[in-house]
Image: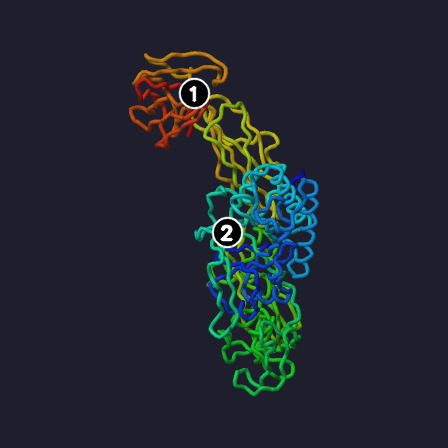
Amino acid sequence: MTATCVVAVPHGAATTLSSGEGFDACTALPTSAMRSVTGYRVANIYIGGENLAPSCTQPTADWVSTVTGAGWRLVPTFVGKQAPCANDNSLTAMGSDPSTAASDGTADADSAATRMAALRLPAPNVVYDDMEGYNAADSACAAAVAAYLDAFVSRMHADGFRAGVYGSTASTVAQLVAAYNNPARQRPDDIWIARQNGGDTTADAAVPAGDWVHRRVRQYRLDEDTLSPPTGDPSSVNIDKDIVDGDTAAPSADQLPSYSVSGTASVGFVRERATPSTSGTDMNHNDAEGTTLNIVCQTTGDSIFGDPVWDKLADGNYVSDLYTTAPGGLIYSGTFPLCDTTPMARLVAPLDGTQVNEGATITAKVYVPEAATSVYVYWSTDGGTTVHLGGSTATAGNDVATVSFTVPGGDGTSVKLLASVANSTNDTSWSAINTPSVRVVAPRVTMAAAPPGTVAAAYTFGWTGLDGAARPTAYDVQYERAPWNGAFGAWTSPTGWTGTTSTSKALSLAQGYAYCVRARAYGVFGNVGDWSVPRCLARPLDDRAMAAGAGWTRGTSSGYYNSTWSSSTTYGAALTRTGATLDDVGVLATMCASCGSVAVYVGNTHVGTISLYAPATRRQQFLTVHAFALRSGATVTLRVATKGKLVQVDGLLVSR
């Protein structure tokens, strides 16, 4: 079995988190259509794999640069080898034994990483493996799939990428959920849930709410919509609809490839005109699809499918920007100067929506198209109402200037970035096109769910941490405890619980005590996050801690808590415990087909009635009633609420 691997994300590296509507389709639309489509912000792309249908088109690096420059974020999908028991037996299968399947997973991950590099989508971007449906009841087949996915995720992590998995709730997703907390398995960073029930939400009954939080995509409609660009553009394609709240991909912001003709569809070329207008003189110079363009500046002209931007070329002619690989949607790209004499700074990095760690250094890159003496980058945490200087640099212009400074604000802060330049005659201008906002995140810890109680003498509390796109470097862990008849004591850190790299700790439990555990994380930049929401449980008092009234029989036997029990079939028979401090109460009891019910009182208040019925006998079952206001020195009474039916109590759960 492959060992668990920490994601290899460089310190300070940003991944692209997206939320909102997305779509996936087998055929990629021309870039001109992608730049004019509205209503979506995320698109799937197929990057390869031997089970990718021949009719599906793979994008080029220029296509990727163009659509991400227009604001799109991508879901790169690799259709590698499939399960030996796949529902579609025409697909190429992985090896049927785990070792061969693991080799296939490693090889497919290497192929996916190679394709990502060719598309200029470097690590730590995410790659999703497409695992189509299979017979999950076939244990040998399921073991092969597990080995394949473990190897795929491990190899993607080793190459610095994040790894996601697409699959159905009946097979792939069910198998991943079952292994979520298994340390011997590789957990993917993101999950893409295929359930076409029309629900426009990433929540799904098959995936617990605490699993893959903000790391989900869900395909909720299949082949039910046609994506149609604006009137006049012939491009259209059937799509599957997705809702996104997780990792997506985009090129690194410092890659500025050459620009070319793109998106001309069946026409195959774009006309150069004397003026930025469809009625401008045709200069009899048609640039074919893929021709490199020497763009010197941008201006506004006749709108084509909603895009008013035209590019002026080095030969003095103009082409519609819609039919180029220049970044930008239906606005100026921010990469080129405007065709005038005003100095204009344009931020080209970071991308809008980039996630940055609390306390990290943020590097802003400013494209300076005019000769300039200085570049300034400002930040604002109130949307631009108040701005503060982050840093400045001298520049000769016509270049990319870099300004770095410490990101301001704490966890959850949105930081808007602006730039300005000054030229040799001291003319200044603010950035008017690109004003990205980045989101500050602190290291966070989520405690694993815990049961309300346990009869064991120890319990292992677990947690997960996240520091932006990376893992925290260490954790502080504390516990507090309260006896059944008293208040919680101070938070305590046993030896080895401070600065630990572990994600679980075992805690010894005394009978009649409630325990709460919390953790906080250290980020890669040394910053410390807030304490997590605690997880609490209690170890119950034995049934002998309660006074038994008339109608109760007491006995001893193995298989019971402390080998003791108290039983009654007498309506109204009571067990009592005085002096309790609590706001939660429950019983440790036997459930069976002939069992009755027990009413629970705190003082004179009836707080709930618990049914002990079950079709088969089950011992040592924890059953609780709803929370109520904290009571001190209270008497807890358990009263038989049925006639002639067994009520067998094994312990009393008192907590707060």
Q: Nearer the viewer, residue 292 or 129?
A: 129
> Element type at marker 2?
strand
Report which residue position mark 1 lands on.
651
Q: Nearer the viewer, residue 188 or 482?
A: 188
Circle 1 residues within 10 Å: few <14, some 14–19, many ≥20: many
Instruction: Confirm whether residue 190 shows in the render.
Output: no
Side (left or right) of 479 relative to 1: left
Which residue is painted at 46% across and 61% down in the image? 225
Report which residue position mark 2 lands on.
218
Q: Quadrant of the N terminus?
A: top right
Against 211, residue 492 (above or below) is: above
Which residue is painted at 56% across and 41% down in the image? 136
Against 106, residue 272 (above or below) is: below
Residue 462 spot, x, y in % from top left: 55, 35
Against 349, residue 489 (above or below) is: above
Q: How many marks?
A: 2
Amino acid type shown at disc 1 = Gly
Q: Quadrant of the C terminus?
A: top left
* Mark-to-mark CA distance, 2 and 1: 44 Å
Amino acid type shown at disc 2 = Arg
Residue 495 spot, x, y in % from top left: 60, 30
Residue 446 spot, x, y in % from top left: 52, 41
Residue 147 quadrant: top right
> Element type at marker 1?
strand
